[in-house]
Image: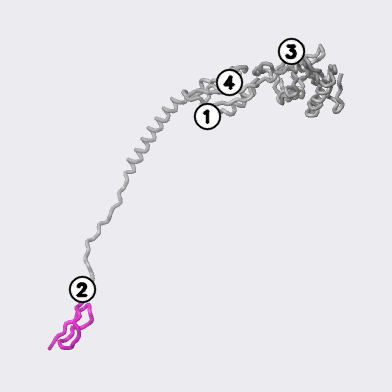
Amino acid sequence: MKFQWHTIFDRDRTPRAGTGRSIRRPLETRARFELRSAEKTRIAPQLPWRGVTLGIIVVTMVGAAILSSVWLYFEDNIRVQELHVIGATAVDHSQVIEAAALYGSWLPTADLKGAAQRIETVSGVKLATVTRDWPNGIEIYIEENQGWGYWQTSNQRLTIDEHGKWLAVARQPDVGAPTIRYIASPTESISENNVDSDAVQLVERLASESIFEKLKIEPSSYVFRDDRGLTVLFDKTPDVIFGDSTNFLFKVSALSAALETLSKNNLSVAEIDLRFGRNVVLR
């Protein structure tokens, strides 16, 4: 009895001798199951929460103590103890410092904008800028009102700006600044209420546009009367009554034509009145 051998992994039978079939090598076999070592269960590390909590508490307490010490040290040392007023010559420094109201305040939170606004209400102050000067100072930069000229009666004189505003406190006008003499009644006292702003602005325009230099005449003084307005006086030229600032360019042209006419005809005239439009009056 013959036995034939079969692989349990390949269903092809072993060929018999002389059959002419090619011999097929059996597939490599391996066990269907393998034994592996059992994996160990990993245990997650646990934080020492009690120690961490205690550490946080200690760090917090130490940090709070340090911050408290720093606060106590700087709380007094960075308070405003010095105020420096810069640029003020006519304005009273003590009034500026009082208006600032910053002495003793805490420097980091000091209200600089509010201080500047209060300072600008001080008489003579045109503009104020306030800055911190660490560690405990304040610097106040002052731009003062600048006088342009004077409004004057027989015994009083007011400093005014180019708009005719009376400046009770201001830097004095430059040397040779215009003075407008106000001819008032003997019983009338001069005040800011009787400064004629239109007359002041007229004189300012005549000077800024160099009108008299172009006409080659030089004014000696300016006079204002309520009934005539502004009159410009000259030494070798007839006085010119402008009145007010209306029709400014026409009045300048009329004055130029009148001066040319007087020069050509050798006329003797005391006044040139420009208040009546095209009707230039020569007296």
Tell me, yes or no, whether the two marked residues, 1 and 3, touch with CB atoms within 8 Å: no
Above-or-below relation of 246 to 191: below
Above-or-below relation of 244 to 235: below
Residue that carries the numbered disc 1 in the rendered image: 109
At 46% from the left and 23% from the top, the residue drawn is 77
146 inside magenta stretch: no
The reply to whether residue 191 is visible in this rendering is no
Residue that carries the numbered disc 2 in the rendered image: 29
Q: Is residue 278 left or right of residue 205?
A: right
Residue that carries the numbered disc 4 in the rendered image: 87
Sequence-wise, the earlier of marks 2 and 1 is 2
- Closer to us: mark 1 or mark 3? 3
Q: Amino acid at mark 1?
A: Thr
Asked which secondary structure carries label 4, the reply is loop
Tell me, yes or no, whether the two marked residues, 4 and 3, touch with CB atoms within 8 Å: no
Which stretch is magenta?
1-30
Asked which secondary structure carries label 3, the reply is loop
Q: Amino acid at mark 2?
A: Thr
> Distance from label 1 to label 3 (Cα)?
47 Å
> Distance from label 2 to label 3 (Cα)?
131 Å
Q: Residues within 10 Å of mark 4 (few under 14, many from 20)?
A: few
Q: Quadrant of residue 15?
A: bottom left
Q: Is residue 161 left or right of residue 99?
A: right
Disc ID at residue 156: 3
Q: Quadrant of residue 202?
A: top right
